[in-house]
């Protein structure tokens, strides 16, 4: 099945499906808006002036292309393939999220929308959305779970400085899932003027494909860098997965290259054998939530479970539908890292490479050593450093028992 | 055929020259026994049709009242299976009142479409409203419900243009539910003047009776809508009565049914001057 697959890969189909996953499972009120967005995005994608405008902002405002860095001390430490960091934590706002926000806000303005809403977990997407809204002078409302407001207070302050209104969401356990529910409720209420700027490669079609396309700049740059510096493609690409936008952005330009292993690392929280994790692919089963069919953490009755991860950005009970499909067809592998493993990797990276990673890529860092060994010396493994850890130092200090 | 109950009810309402009152309550709210007491009291209190919500953890189109009701239902342990048991218990004592289940797709997908449709029909359920399953995604659900002869009732909204109404009308049966405001349940009230022409458009597109819901909170409002639509739906205002009863240690059924009587009476009287 795998051998003939890559050349034929052209998902999603016209209905927004990746095999059985994806789709448009939203309230009828939103359906006309979803169709309008789909048409507007297709038109923008085909418009060279839109792409040129986006490229200009990515270069001059976001700071792309981001560097490819050979993490030689970490490589030496693990004793396997060369480990490269794709430095998306060096983007303006400190994470990969802004790649997508820049694309979507240009689209929103093209559609004549005058108000932007977003959901956020770790706050990185909220900050990136607030940033582009400030840049283009649009009002911005960010929904954020009350628990996340608590554990990501530096990002809450950043959003407010940028002029956004941050609405704490207290329903459910007060995390990303609940913030997304509340953003959907806002959208269905404010259909005429509001653009919902979704932060991950999930939600109703066209969001999963659109967010992937905007994030694919990561993988395209990795491809060009590796060809320039190694005259070959990487042997493996590794990324952390919550909703999965940084991972799909890294993976997508390599899907047709069967020799490139694509490895996503889910958040195992307190362990996959406990209820406290956020590994939807490895610990969930297919279902429908937030506009798409995908792997979900759910009970036997189809009620959605609350995820758990030390990383607020991975603490989500679902995953982008394209990952669900890549899993089923065997094109990508999915592993997991616990809170403890991520914390260890976080500290190791800081000490060996002088880079404080966010807790999200720390999950990928926790698995990169074994992957480098599997690939072996002389090979190349690329890890997407999708965010920097400044926002996490308070949470990490607390877990390490350090008082600041 | 189970859809016959809905058709018979609308035919009877037409013969009486009045609109129907549709009462929405949540399964298991605040307990299985009390929810059954409410259900059993609804027809006598004036509900012509019953919508029974089945709780979902993430009700994206609901405002705070129904979100809270769903949480109470879940806390009482009412899964979709429990909701069907409740429906069957109601049906054993009432052969005529149409019973519509309303909720979200994932519990149905988890249950299994064919098994669910079969069990729903066996429980005496006449129709389904599945909020997050638009026509584009309804193929499997429609097939299963059709085979079991359970109606799929679609939603039309203020964002539905004529082309969209055609899509919505295809494959819907029983009646069409017109969501009178763009928004979540139980918050905004539609502009009075906007409802009548919208209902007329929906009726023309679907050739079916139109029930209007979202934001119906008062008898006056219910009467206004009863003058232009075949049925009026109230939900948030009823489940809020459960919350109020719990807060003051009163009987949930007593409070809910009193509210139903007030709303149903307003609906019943609304067309009298014109039809007498």
Image (tube, coloured by chain):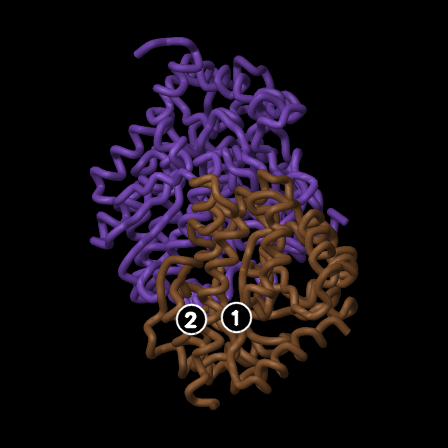
Chain colours: A purple, B brown
Q: Earlier in the sequence, mark 1 or mark 2?
A: 1
Chain hosting mark 1? B
Seen from the viewer's position, the closer of residues A57 and A148 is: A148
The reply to the same-chain question for discs 1 and 2 is yes
Say above or below: A28 vs A254.
below
Name which residue lies at 29% across and 52% down: A56
According to the picture, the residue beneath numbered tag 1 turns out to be: B21
Q: Secondary structure at mark 1?
A: strand
- Circle 1 residues within 10 Å: few <14, some 14–19, many ≥20: many
- Residue at the far top: name it: A402
Residue A387 sits in quarter: top left
Res. A196 in view: yes
According to the picture, the residue beneath numbered tag 2 turns out to be: B222
Name which residue lies at 52% across and 58% down: B257
Name which residue lies at 78% across and 67% down: B148
Say above or below: B196 vs B138.
below
Q: Horizontal and vertical percent for residue B81? A: 71, 48
The reply to whether callout 1 and callout 2 are in contact (CB within 8 Å) is yes
Chain hosting mark 2? B
- Circle 2 residues within 10 Å: few <14, some 14–19, many ≥20: many
| Left or right of A59 in this view: B215 | right
| Left or right of B188 in this view: A318 | right
- As drawn, the label of residue A335 is none
Q: Horizontal and vertical percent for residue B236? A: 45, 56
């Amino acid at each position: 099945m795998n051998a003939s697959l890559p050349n034929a890969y052209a998902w999603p189909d016209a209905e927004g499906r990746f095999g059985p996953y994806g789709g448009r499972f939203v309230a009828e009120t939103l359906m006309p808006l979803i169709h309008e967005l789909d048409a507007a995005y297709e038109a923008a994608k085909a418009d060279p002036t839109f792409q040129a405008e986006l490229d200009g902002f990515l270069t001059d405002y976001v700071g792309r292309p981001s560097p490819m860095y050979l993490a030689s001390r970490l490589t030496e430490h693990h004793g396997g393939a060369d480990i490269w960091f794709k430095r998306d934590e060096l983007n303006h706002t400190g994470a990969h999220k802004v790649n997508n926000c820049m694309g979507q806000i240009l689209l929103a303005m093209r559609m004549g929308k005058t108000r932007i809403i977003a959901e956020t977990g770790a706050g990185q997407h909220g900050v990136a959305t607030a940033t582009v809204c400030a840049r283009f002078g649009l009002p911005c409302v960010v929904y954020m779970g009350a628990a996340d407001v608590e554990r990501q207070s530096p990002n809450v302050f950043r959003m407010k400085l940028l002029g956004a209104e941050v609405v704490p969401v207290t329903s459910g356990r007060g995390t990303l899932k609940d913030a997304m529910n509340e953003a959907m409720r806002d959208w269905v209420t404010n259909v005429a003027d509001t653009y919902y700027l979704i932060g991950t490669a999930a939600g109703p079609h066209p969001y999963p494909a659109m967010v992937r396309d905007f994030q694919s700049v990561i993988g395209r740059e990795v491809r060009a860098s590796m060809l320039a510096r190694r005259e070959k493609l990487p042997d493996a690409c590794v990324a952390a997965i919550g909703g999965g936008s940084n991972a799909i952005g890294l993976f997508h330009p390599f899907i047709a290259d069967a020799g490139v292993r694509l490895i996503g690392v889910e958040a195992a929280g307190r362990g996959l054998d406990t209820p406290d994790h956020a590994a939807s692919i490895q610990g969930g089963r297919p279902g429908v939530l937030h506009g798409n069919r995908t792997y979900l953490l759910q009970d036997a009755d189809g009620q959605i479970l609350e995820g758990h991860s030390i990383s607020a950005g991975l603490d989500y009970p679902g995953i982008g539908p394209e990952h669900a499909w890549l899993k089923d067809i065997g094109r990508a592998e999915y592993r997991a890292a616990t809170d403890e493993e991520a914390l260890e990797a976080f500290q190791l990276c800081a000490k060996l490479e002088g880079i404080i990673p966010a807790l999200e890529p720390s999950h990928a860092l926790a698995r990169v050593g074994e992957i480098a060994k599997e690939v072996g010396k002389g090979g190349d493994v690329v890890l997407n450093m999708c965010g920097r850890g400044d926002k996490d130092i308070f949470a990490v200090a607390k877990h390490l028992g350090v008082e600041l | 055929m189970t859809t016959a109950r809905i058709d018979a009810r609308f035919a009877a309402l037409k013969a009486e020259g009045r609109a129907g009152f549709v009462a929405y309550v949540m399964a298991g709210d605040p307990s299985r026994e009390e929810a059954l007491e409410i259900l059993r009291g609804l027809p006598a209190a004036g509900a012509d049709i019953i919508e029974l919500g089945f709780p979902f953890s993430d009700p994206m189109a609901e405002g705070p009242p129904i979100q809270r009701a769903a949480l109470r239902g879940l806390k009482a342990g009412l899964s979709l299976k429990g909701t069907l048991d409740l429906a069957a218990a109601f049906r054993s004592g009432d052969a005529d009142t149409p019973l519509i289940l309303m909720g979200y797709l994932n519990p149905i997908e988890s249950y299994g479409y064919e098994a669910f449709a079969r069990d729903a029909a066996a429980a005496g359920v006449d129709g389904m409203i599945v909020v997050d399953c638009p026509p584009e995604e309804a193929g499997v659900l429609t097939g299963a419900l059709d085979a079991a002869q359970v109606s799929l009732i679609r939603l039309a909204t203020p964002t539905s243009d004529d082309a969209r109404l055609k899509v919505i009308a295809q494959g819907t049966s029983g009646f069409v539910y017109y969501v009178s405001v763009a928004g979540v349940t139980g918050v905004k009230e539609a502009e009075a003047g906007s409802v009548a022409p919208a209902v007329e458009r929906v009726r023309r597109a679907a050739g079916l009776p139109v029930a209007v819901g979202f934001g119906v909170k008062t008898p006056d409002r219910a009467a206004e809508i009863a003058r232009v639509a075949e049925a009026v739906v109230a939900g948030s205002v009823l489940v809020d009565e459960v919350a109020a009863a719990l807060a003051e240690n009163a009987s949930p059924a007593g409070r809910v049914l009193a509210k139903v009587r007030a709303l149903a009476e307003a609906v019943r009287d609304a067309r009298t001057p014109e039809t007498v």
